[in-house]
Image (cartoon, grey):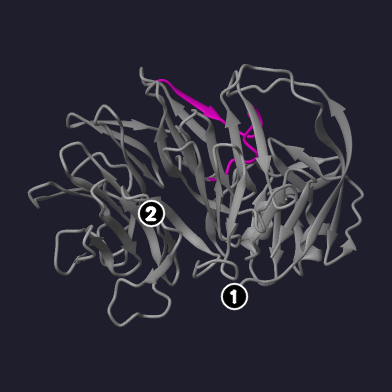
Amino acid sequence: MKKSLSLIIVVVLILSTSTIHGITDQQYVQYTKNNSALVADRVVALEADTLGGIWVATSGSGAIYIDSAGKWHTYMEMSSGLKNNFLNDVTLDSLGNTHFATNIGVTSRMKDNTWNNYYMNENKIFGETVTALAGDGKGGLWHGVTGYGAYYKNANGVMTHYSSANSSIPSSNVSSFAFDQKGGVWIGTELTYNEMGGIAYLNADGKWTLYNSNNSKLPSNRVREVYVAKNGAVWIGTINGLAKLYNNEWVIYSNNSVWEYDVRSVTEDSAGNIYAATWGDGLLKIDPAGKLTNYKSSDSPIPNNYIYEVELDTKGNIWLGTNVGLTQIKTTSQVTQPPVVQPKIVTVFVKSLQVPFDVQPVIRDGNTLVSVRFILEALGQDVTWNEAERKVVSTGDKTIELTIGEKTGYVDGVAYPLNIPSEIINGRTMIPLRWIAENLDYDVQWNPVNYRVDIN
């Protein structure tokens, strides 16, 4: 069970004027619950349509459609036919219908504005979690259902079930679908305690081909995304890197570190550039020559480095779904932006009570560092300092160990990566706030507009 905590950061600002760096020649707009129709800032999936609009699936705000004129249309459980405000995916079929994946089946908004809801299983098991949806261009719809595998519903509504028990699909947990020009479907799966996971390819004749880390160069059997590019190359996002399979040749895009790219989403622009959204490493761009550029919050319009989804609309604008809202990166000429705010003094409140710091929090590469003893004691933990090892040990609900200068921390003896290491500032040990809070089982939401952090 998640704990509940409210934390607000109040910021005294200094002003500066700058152009956007990293993703050049482009402007951006950041939408959050404080300046838009979003009720919650977690945007988990995006789907552009052919009319210049984009569908936005959220975790807590239901669904939003932003039309080509920029008008927002909101669909929530109490005001529409949407079954649940917590969505996992959104897709369009070739008939113009919009489908939403939820934890209790599928909700469809039909082209005539009517709604219907359905489950994949005849017994309508409560809590059926649909994780992935994809229209196949023939009026059919593929579904990934946690624990059940894949379901294909054709244009006539006939359902076919593919599980590890009745087919060659390598896992009952399906994460993604993609379609090639030969009529085949690529299925991304995740390994389970008794299933291999990896990639399954079902060709137009019904023949299966499996790819995993044992029989190929696939970086991991935990596959997050499969995308087929215009040239036929298959791009595969895994928790351990990005892979391209083209003409039976593999290319692996590596972070060249202990912690590889965790790729959640892949898309392509009209020039053949590939964009990959990562969890923790921002946005990757691979040009047609294979050159990789990594954009992060420290050098680009990206609000933070944790991105669920990347999508392009018909105008070529880049949209990012993140855990701090929705970002639109516009394809316009580079301009000087209005003054950009930079934090100078950060004041932290825990449960509406101000936490006194004798050394002010600082921001390094988009990460907030705070004094270890003050924040951990506010979160109910005890703190000790090992001078010989230059290590902080915190005990309480969990045992946490952080060593100065190290980008790996330990929670109950298990190693976890840090975006930025702990450091000593003015005699005080400073630690990453988000890393600490999330590893103590709190959800952290950062608002880049007013520098507000909500931890629930």
Residue at 88%, 32% in the rendered image: 14
Q: Point out the stretch of residues depicted in magenta.
A: 291-307
Query: Which one is in front, 164 or 138?
Result: 138
Numbered badge on residue 155: none
Mark 2, residue position: 97
Query: Which one is in front, 175 or 206?
Result: 206
Query: Which one is in front, 100 or 9?
Result: 100
In this rendering, the answer to whether 46 lies above or below 194 is above
The quadrant holding residue 159 is bottom left
Mark 1, residue position: 1
Say which quadrant the N terminus sits in: bottom right
Judged left or right of residue 2, residue 387 is right
Element on which disc 1 rests: loop
Residue at 26%, 52% in the rendered image: 139
Please report whichever mark, 2 or 1, sits nearer to the chain's N-terminal start: 1
Say which quadrant the C terminus sits in: bottom right
Element on which disc 2 rests: loop
Location of residue 118 in the rendering, given as x and y in whole percent from the top left corner: 36, 71
Query: Which one is in front, 428 or 41?
Result: 41
- The amino acid type of the residue labelled 1 equals Met
Judged left or right of residue 269, residue 196 is left
- Please, which residue is most extreme toward the bottom here? 123
Q: CA distance from mark 2 to mark 1?
A: 36 Å
